[in-house]
Image (spheres, rainbow, N blue to C red):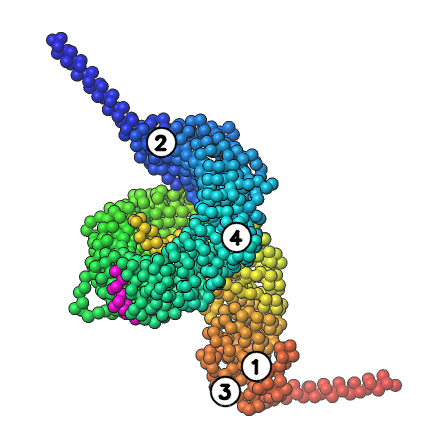
Amino acid sequence: MMMEWKWYLWFIRMAVMLLVLERCSWCTTDACLEHERIALLHLKPFFNYRNQLQSWVEVKGSDCCKWERVECNTTTRRLIQLSLNSTKWEDNMEYVMDNRNLNAWYLNASMFLPFEELKRLYLSGNVIGGSLENEGFGKLSSTLSNLEILDLSENYLNDSILLSLSELSSLRYLDLSINTFEGSSHLRGFQLLSRLNNLETLDLSGNSLKNTILFHMRNISSLKTLRLSANQLKGRLDHIHDGTQWRLTNLEELDLSGNLFRNNTISFPQGLSSLKSLTLYNNHLQGSLDTIGLSNLTNLKKLDLSVNQIESFQSFKDGGRKLELTHLEELNLGYNHFNTSVFASLNKLSNLKSLSIWDNGLKGSIDMKDLEAFIKLRELDMSYNELRDLVIHQELNVSSNVEELYLDHSTLNTNILQGIGVLSSLKTLSLYDCGLIGPLPNHGWCDLRNLEVLDVSGNALEGMLPHCFSNLTSLRELYISGNHFQIPLSFAPFANLSNLKALLSNENKMVTEPSFYTSIPKFQLEVISLPKCITSQQLSCKLPTFLYYQYDLRYVDLSHNNFSGTVPTWLLENNTKLEDLILKGNSFTGPLSLPSAPNSKVSLIDISQNKLQGQIPTNVCSHFPHLSHLFLSKNAFEGDIPPCLSGMKDLSILDLSDNQLSGRVPEELITKNSLTILRLSNNNLSGHVLPVILNANGLSKLYLDGNNFSGEMANVDVSISEFPTSLREINLGNNKFYGNLPRWMGNVSFLERLALSQNGFEGSIPMEFCNLNRLEFLDLSENNLFGSIPSCFNTLNIKHVHLHGSRLSGPLPIAFYNISSLVTLDLRGNNLTGSIPKWIGTLSSLSVLLLKDNHFHGEVPVQLCKLDSLNIIDLSQNMFSGIIPSCLGNLTLSTETNKILTDSKISPRLTGDGLVKTLGALGNYYYPEGYLEEVIEFTTKSGFLSYEGNILTYMTGIDLSCNNLTGHIPPELGNLSEIYSLNLSHNKLTGVIPSSFAKLHQIESLDLSYNNLSGEIPNQLVELNSLEVFSVAYNNLSGSIPEPKAQFGTFIENSYEGNLFLCGAILHKSCSKTDSPSTISTLSEYKGEDGLIGTYDFCVSFLVSYVVVLLTIFVVLYINQYWRRVWFSLIGKCITTCRYSNVGNFLTYHIFKQ
């Protein structure tokens, strides 16, 4: 019995020990330390913008080593890296500089003390303004002895933090770039950085440092990399301060780019003898550069002098003109003023491997003999010059070594391809936009059997690819976009290129070939881009046949062709690594079908602008679980939005606009954290979307316009909502919202663009809108708003204001006074009164002024002439009077890109091995970061047209019609050579049509109808070759109409009607010899502008009128007996009266005389 108890106790003891061991194993091996997990949770409230730390959950036992942005030691499970960059705000550096510090906060560095083995800490882009008092980084020095990397870039730190940073003696890498350091207020701070004996890399780029910083850096002897770009350094480089020399004996990389060095002498002290890389990009170096000081940099391997104004090299000491750096391997002289003589001054650089001399003064032919000293040259970039040819010799040493040659944006002769085969080692040849024309030659370039990358895109090459093209068996990347090649659907010319991985052939033409051709290509592409290739409708049913044999595709762009049938899901089934599928702008029909098996690699699908119907498949989410971009707009999809889209954790952009979707929007879709852009415009969606929008913590841009959403926004209970800090752009226009404008909108403080047009809002604009200090676009048009605009609007930096079609009243609001940022002011169709105030001249950026259809009066102010950016003016349908200011002719009407809303366009990126180096630049597909458009409506060409996008940037016009303007048309308006539309109709203008209008070379619409203009139509107007609409109807013009040639041959009778004395074939009225216009020029603008009719015309018109009156009286009296009696009775009385009157006058005269 005792033995059984012993065995029993022993068994219990072992079980307990196993449990303890199991527990310890879990603690030390599988999970992070508990106190570090708790410390991370304490950090979370400070660094959780848009819920980026959602994996940091407060669940006991949760392994924090598996949390996002956390890295642990695999053995000790202690935290060694913490990446909290950009987790406080989205992109704080986009804010206006003057307001940046408003968002700054102060960090308690003690929160990092529990992480005793922390090696790398990234805190960039978090709006940190400094540390709390006595809680700076110095407190970490004793505990975090392993901290080697600290990144504090893109914050608002200043010199005051340097003292605490100097105590982190273990640091090897310190990044303080893009902050507000000045190097003056706390001088000892930078000096104390010399305590950091282990510091190897220091980045102070993008601050406001002066030359004194170089003095303070002189003793940090451990430094290997020092970056001081984009500061305010200037003057000489050799003596830093009081003759003190640098002691940076270990410094290998020095970046001084983007500063203010202007001197022609670059001289460095002996203390930089270890320097290997020097960057002086984008300074103000100019003329002949004295390079004697560079001789001290005996180990220099890389030198960047690009983006300066250097013309040549010269040593002012010994008169030499050669750059002597025998170890130099990489030299960048791009964007300077060098000419072809520069090669002679570089011929002592015997170790040079890379030479960039893009965008200089190289002209004509380059003889490759000039480069024969560079026997080790591998890369040569001479892009953006005026080169026409390369003279290549068979025996040159450089010919056998150069591997990369870039001649983009030159004007080359196509014959260059015949001689370039001598460069037998060439691996990369780039001839983008070089003016190459005609077919490719069938020899020379085909001998480049080592060629891996070939770019001939953006030229005018044509025809079929030559048979010798198959010799390029090493080719991996081929760019032939933007030419006129004829590419067979089978892609037979590429069939033998077994190494080909990327093919971009945008905007070429695909052609059919004999049906018996069944070649199977040897290549397996990873990237294929063929947009805008199909031009024949006969090919609209076929996809390129070679695609059926591809199984390794990652990127496919077949957009904007005429492909039809069903969506080719077999592309997804055959290519399991496919990431981006772009089928936009084709004619695919039927329901959207999905592949038979899920594809976890797919990141982007764009099937917009097709003819797809039915419902969006509900299993789209499970088939593409890692989808980040989905574009299905401009189809005919109907039904509900699949609820599963709300659960896709990687979905960032969703565009379902311009379909026939109905029902409600899933709330989770708006509030999901990963989604940044949601576009549901122009569907049949309904329901209430408030207060859901107020919980859209991750959403940046929301477009719900053109639907049936309803509700009273002002009555939403905002007390239970957190206003989203991420929302930048909201478009709720063209819906059924009603009531007052919501005051709580002013609390969405980061809002930049707001569109609420075409709803049922009423009342006045709330004062709270003035809190939107980042607002640049506001559209409240076509509502029932009344009252005035809050005067506090002039505190905003707003650019575009649209308030047309409401009931605003009173004078032009003082709210716009002195807003120097204002570009567009649209107040059409309101009840505004008064005159245009003189302060209109303070709107220095104003480009578009639309005041049509109000009740303004007074004169057109001359202050408009001072607005240099003004190029669209619409003052029509008001009560303006007086003359047209002649100074309007001084307006330049230049192209203004600020008239449109600019949004970056992004090209997709592959997550693979980075095969295509410039897919974004050479590809055709981009998706915008925003969809709100600036649209300007303007009456021209006898119609009401809308302008947007690039067309808007070029549009110029003046409309002063339907007013009470008087006087002559100023001849100075003829100076508006860039104007496209001029409308002065329906006024009371007199005088002649200025012959200076013949200088309006760009004008497309000219309307002078319904005035009192006289004289002849200047024959010089026939020189207006762009004129499409012309009207001088209903004036007092006379003489012959202009010759019916050029554009004037297209105008019909209604352009001239209502002018009794005009003649010409179009008017079916011949001009007699005496009536014909004189060959001598019309009366001068100033002599004939009194509007008097000629003597001959006056006599004729008087005689005709007199005869007509007499005949009318005779006919009436003859027909009507009653009127005849009345008439003769009246005549009798007049005779009697006149007789007595005359006798009376006679008697009075004689009596007075006596």
Mark 4 to mark 1: distance in Å? 71 Å
What residue is shown at x 39% (from left), y 45% (from top)? 699
- Residue contact between numbered discs 2 and 3, judged by CB atoms under 8 Å: no
Q: Left or right: where does residue 229 sit relative to residue 380?
A: right
Upstream in sequence: badge 2 or badge 3: 2
Q: Amino acid at mark 3?
A: Lys
Snapshot quadrant of residue 1016? bottom right
| Alpha-carbon span between mark 3 and mark 1 | 16 Å
1 or 2: mark nearer the eye: 2
Instruction: Identify the mark at residue 1069; answer none if there is no mark.
Output: 3
Which residue lies at the image location 27% right of the left edge and 56% below the top edge?
501
Q: Any mark on residue 79, and which?
A: 2
Name the residue beneath numbered marker 4. Answer: 291
What is the residue that sits farthest to the right in this orientation?
1154
Mark 4 or mark 3, which has the lower sequence index?
A: 4
Of badges 3 and 1, the one in the foreground is 1
Q: Position of residue 598 (x, y in %)?
A: 22, 48
- Please name which of the two marks, 4 or 1, marks the residue nearer to the observer: 4
Front residue (pair 502, 727): 502
* Between marks 2 and 3 in the image, the one whose residue lies nearer the viewer: 2
Q: CA distance from mark 1 to mark 2?
A: 89 Å
Q: Which mark is residue 1139?
A: none
Residues under numbered marks 1 and 2 in contact, where contact means CB atoms less than 8 Å apart: no
Q: Amino acid at mark 4?
A: Thr
Question: Which residue is found at the position 33% from the left and 45% from the top?
Answer: 669
Res 979 seen here: yes
Estimate the x, y position of residue 954 in percent, counting from the top left: 48, 64
Question: Given the image, on which type of amino acid does mark 1 rest?
Answer: Glu
Dot 4 or dot 1, earlier in sequence: 4
Q: Secondary structure at mark 2?
A: strand
